[in-house]
């Protein structure tokens, strides 16, 4: 799975465009934030996609502006886009939080709890923004609860907030946090799980 291929091919499939246009869209749609798409990588990935026949580039010049390359998707690129869409929908997307929680014993529990509290506040602000977007979206939408992607993002954030708050509660409880002294011990304390 390559999120850059998915985003770049998807944008080019939507409309032939230049690298600059893609970077502008990434920022406008906030893909740099929620999909972790770094705009500094766009041109290198476009070169790769063009070199391997997934896109073609047509150079054009408008009035006194510098030349720019307008990219279009090829049949091979459309096939890769389809594969990337399915892979992203059905593949296992690892969650780095799981690793962080699994290795909690390696950090100061109160310090982690403080960091999680700051993170929860940030998530709750984001939830307010998403809920506002959902509430303001004209109805009906294709999904009965509202705009599909916004609702899905909201639900993911709500789950993250729930477990972060629970982790904070455990980490601040001296008895419980004292049992987190090994890998994966947040699951069950320090009892032997190898049996």
Image (spheres, rainbow, N blue to C red):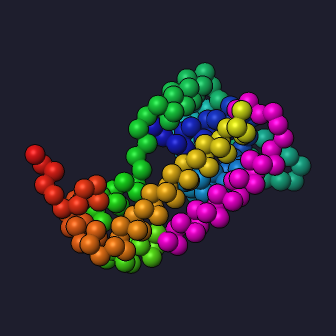
Residue 18: name its quadrant. top right
130 in magenta: yes
46 in magenta: no
Residue at 64% x, 57% y is: 127
Judge by depth and name the residue closer to the eye, 17 or 156.
156
Q: Is residue 180 above or below residue 23?
A: below
The majority secondary structure of the magenta stretch comes to helix
Q: Is residue 147 left or right of residue 117?
A: right
Residue at 39% x, 64% y is: 167
**Which x, y percent locates residue 81?**
57, 30
Judge by depth and name the residue closer to the eye, 15 or 138.
138
What segment is highlighted magenta in the picture? 117-143
State how many labels appear.
0
Judge by depth and name the residue closer to the eye, 138 or 83.
138
Q: Is residue 191 above or below residue 46?
A: below
Q: Is residue 109 above or below residue 62?
A: below
Residue at 61% x, 63% y is: 124
Q: Is residue 134 above or below residue 10?
A: below
Judge by depth and name the residue closer to the eye, 8 or 135.
135
- Screen quadrant of the N terminus: top left
Extreme-left residue of the structure: 195
Residue 171: name its quadrant. bottom left
Extreme-right residue of the structure: 63
Is residue 16 visible in the rendered structure shown here? Answer: no
């Amino acid at each position: 799975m390559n999120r850059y291929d998915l985003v770049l091919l998807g944008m080019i499939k939507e409309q032939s465009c230049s690298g600059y246009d893609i970077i502008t869209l990434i920022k406008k749609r906030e893909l740099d934030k929620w999909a972790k798409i770094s705009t500094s990588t766009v041109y290198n990935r476009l070169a790769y996609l063009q070199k391997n026949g997934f896109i073609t580039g047509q150079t054009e010049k408008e009035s006194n502006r510098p030349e720019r390359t307008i990219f279009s998707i090829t049949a091979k690129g459309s096939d890769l886009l389809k594969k990337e869409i399915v892979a992203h929908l059905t593949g296992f997307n690892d969650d780095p939080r799981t690793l962080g929680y699994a290795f909690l014993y390696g950090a100061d529990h109160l310090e982690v709890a403080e960091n999680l509290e700051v993170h929860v506040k940030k998530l709750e602000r984001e939830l307010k923004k998403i809920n506002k977007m959902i509430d303001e979206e004209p109805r009906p939408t294709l999904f009965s609860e509202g705009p599909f992607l916004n609702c899905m993002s909201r639900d993911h954030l709500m789950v993250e907030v729930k477990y972060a708050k629970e982790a904070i509660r455990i980490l601040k409880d001296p008895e419980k946090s004292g049992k987190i002294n090994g890998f994966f011990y947040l699951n069950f304390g320090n009892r032997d799980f190898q049996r």
